[in-house]
Image: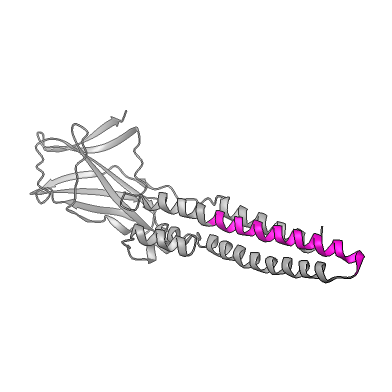
């Protein structure tokens, strides 16, 4: 087999490794102190610390509030150290105006504070309202474009470069196959005829495989984009743990308490 044929096979294998290989992004675990709850007038103040962090660290913070029966409360009127780009450190405070949420603390509530570390790219970028239809269209135009937007700059766009690279290389080898076949037809040298024909067949096969590789890149990225975009409106990293220790404010005795819960 010719040296250029070997190089092209290595190129195709590399593209498939790029497409199907997994990249692990290590995420620093976030530890939150046990929240302290204080009831004042028509609001509930939630105090917490982000442990082992500094003011330079940035986090995405959200809370889960449930009633005494385990039903989740849709708390919307939240303010303070919550949401995007929350700095690390101690003495964090979230205020829940439950009256504006048409909720009354006539029974106990359970509060759990959650946080994930933001990467440098995520911390620098404002929160985007991404359209699912737009991300799917972008991935059809350039594989990985939509996933890069959904995942805040992760290099999924490399699949687009690989896809268009396959198309460009397929065109080049198709032209080579045609040129080799013309040489085979027009050659009068018996010793070269077989070589020209073999080159034409090999180059045509490589061109065909590159087309299949490009199709595979588009199809797989399209499926990944559909799956990834289906979760655009869901809370990120909201993993329910079976066993947890949370704070609860008990209005009957007017004091915060510690609750141990287990989710079946």
Quadrant location of the C terminus in the rendered image? top left
Say whether residue 19 is left or right of residue 3: left
Point out residue 162 in the picture as x, y percentages from the top left corner.
58, 62
Asked if residue 12 is positioned above or below residue 252 in the image, the reply reads below
| Front position in the image: 220 or 126 | 220
| Front position in the image: 81 or 165 | 165
Residue drawn at 46 percent across, 61 percent down: 140
Residue 16 seen in render? yes
Q: Is residue 31 magenta?
A: no
Asked if residue 261 is positioned above or below residue 80 in the image, the reply reads above
Point out residue 115 in the picture as x, y percentages from the top left corner.
34, 50
Residue 153 seen in render? no
Say whether residue 165 is left or right of residue 230: right
Asked if residue 77 is positioned above or below residue 200 in the image, the reply reads above
Quadrant in the picture for residue 110: top left
Say whether residue 180 is left or right of residue 149: right
Point out residue 183 in the picture as x, y percentages from the top left corner.
81, 70
Residue at the limit of the structure toward the top, as seen here:
264
Please give the range of residues in magenta. 189-217
Helix, strand or loop: magenta stretch: helix
Quadrant in the picture for residue 172: bottom right
Point out residue 218 in the picture as x, y percentages from the top left corner.
51, 57
* Figure label count: 0
Residue drawn at 34 percent across, 32 percent down: 243
| Front position in the image: 87 or 234 | 234
Residue drawn at 49 percent across, 55 percent down: 221
Q: How did the renderer colour the structure?
A: one colour
Q: Is residue 204 magenta?
A: yes
Residue drawn at 11 percent across, 40 percent down: 105
Quadrant location of the N terminus in the rendered image? bottom right
């Amino acid at each position: 087999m010719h040296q250029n044929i070997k190089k092209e096979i290595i190129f195709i294998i590399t593209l498939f490794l790029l497409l199907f290989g997994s990249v692990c992004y290590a995420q620093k675990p976030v530890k939150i102190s046990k929240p302290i709850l204080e009831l004042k007038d028509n609001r509930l103040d939630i105090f917490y610390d982000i442990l082992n962090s500094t003011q330079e660290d940035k986090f995405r913070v959200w809370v889960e509030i449930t009633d005494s029966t385990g039903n989740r409360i849709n708390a919307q009127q939240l303010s303070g150290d919550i949401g995007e780009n929350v700095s690390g450190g101690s003495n964090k405070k979230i205020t829940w105006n439950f009256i504006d949420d048409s909720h009354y603390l006539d029974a106990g509530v359970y509060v759990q504070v959650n946080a994930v570390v933001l990467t440098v790219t995520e911390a620098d970028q404002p929160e985007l309202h991404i359209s699912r239809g737009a991300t799917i269209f972008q991935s059809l135009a350039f594989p990985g474009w939509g996933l890069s937007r959904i995942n805040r700059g992760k290099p999924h766009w490399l699949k687009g470069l690989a896809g268009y690279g396959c198309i460009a290389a397929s065109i080049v080898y198709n032209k080579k196959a045609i040129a080799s076949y013309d040489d085979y037809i027009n050659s009068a040298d018996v010793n070269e005829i077989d070589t020209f024909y073999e080159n034409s067949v090999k180059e045509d096969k490589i061109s065909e495989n590159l087309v299949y590789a490009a199709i595979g890149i588009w199809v797989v990225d399209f499926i990944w984009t559909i799956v990834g975009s289906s979760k655009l409106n869901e809370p990120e990293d909201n993993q329910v743990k079976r066993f947890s220790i949370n704070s609860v404010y008990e209005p009957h005795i007017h004091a915060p308490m510690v609750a141990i819960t287990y989710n079946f």
